[in-house]
Image: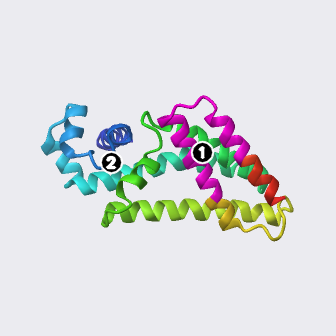
Amino acid sequence: MRKGEATRQAILDESIRLASTVGLGALTIGTLATQTGMSKSGLFAHFNSKESLQIQALEHAGARFREHVVHPMLAAPRGEPRLRALFDLWLTWVSTGLPGGCLFIAADYEFDDQPGPVRDTLVRDQRDWLETMTRVVGSGIVEGHFAADTDPAQFAQDLFGVVLAYSVTSRLIQDPNAEAYARRAFESLLRAAR
């Protein structure tokens, strides 16, 4: 990796770490300059605008999510084992992926009523993730792990709800039982689908 690309990756790493703790809306070229010790003009040359920085931060976080969740999940056998891997890896991401928790979950709430390119990026990413979960559940039907009348889209929606609840109960409320509750909810979803 060239030095310029390595610098850019380090800047993006810091941008998602910072956005996970202060919020994507608070991620600006100025706050990133302060955090990295770089000049605003140097960062402006990389990103051109706050909106561009936020979108590139989301894209970088998406690449990290794929690296830590999606790719390892795809290594598991199709069907229920892959769905279990997806769930385990996703919980780990929410807990430890970034210091402030899942950037996507936080940004979803932050930008849900703010039309524009940042929201559009979030919508695209979340639709893609829901579609990925739907396909994984569908593979469980094909493999005979789940009943033929299982609705993969409904399962994906319900699973999303379990992880959102886990994020709130573990990070905000700091309930020591959050993970156990999430795992029981996931097992209930699996039982209902069999």
Extent of the magenta region: 158-185
Q: Is residue 80 above or below residue 16?
A: below
Q: In this orientation, does residue 76 appear?
A: no
The kind of residue tagged 1 is: Trp
Inspect the image, locate mark 2, and give the three-letter code of the amino acid beneath it: Leu
Main SS of the magenta part reads helix
137 over 62 or under it: above or below: below
Residue toward you, 149 or 57: 149
Say if 85 sits above or below 153 in the image.
Answer: above
Q: Quadrant of residue 160?
A: bottom right
Q: Give the side of residue 78 with respect to residue 160, left or right.
A: right
The structure residue drawn at horizontal position 42% and vertical position 59%, both measured from the top left corner, is: 122
Left or right of 163 in this view: 51: left
**Residue at position x 20%, y 33% in the image:** 34
Quadrant occupied by the C terminus: bottom right
List x then y, in percent, for residue 26.
26, 45
Looking at this view, is 67 or 6 the one in front? 67
How far across and how far down the image is residue 16, in percent? Answer: 37, 42
Residue sitting at the far bottom: 149
Report which residue position mark 2 lands on: 24
Q: Pointers 1 and 2 in contact (CB under 8 A)?
A: no
Binning the other alpha carbons within 10 Å of mark 2 as few (below 14), some (14 to 19) or many (20 upward) gives many
Measured from the top left, where is residue 126 in percent x and y? Answer: 50, 60
> For numbered disc 1, what is the local secondary structure?
helix
Q: Is residue 171 magenta?
A: yes
Q: Earlier in the sequence, mark 1 or mark 2?
A: 2
Where, quadrant-wise, is the N terminus in this rendering?
Answer: top left
Residue 157 part of the magenta-drawn span = no
Kindly identify the residue that appears in the image at 42 percent across and 55 percent down.
Answer: 108
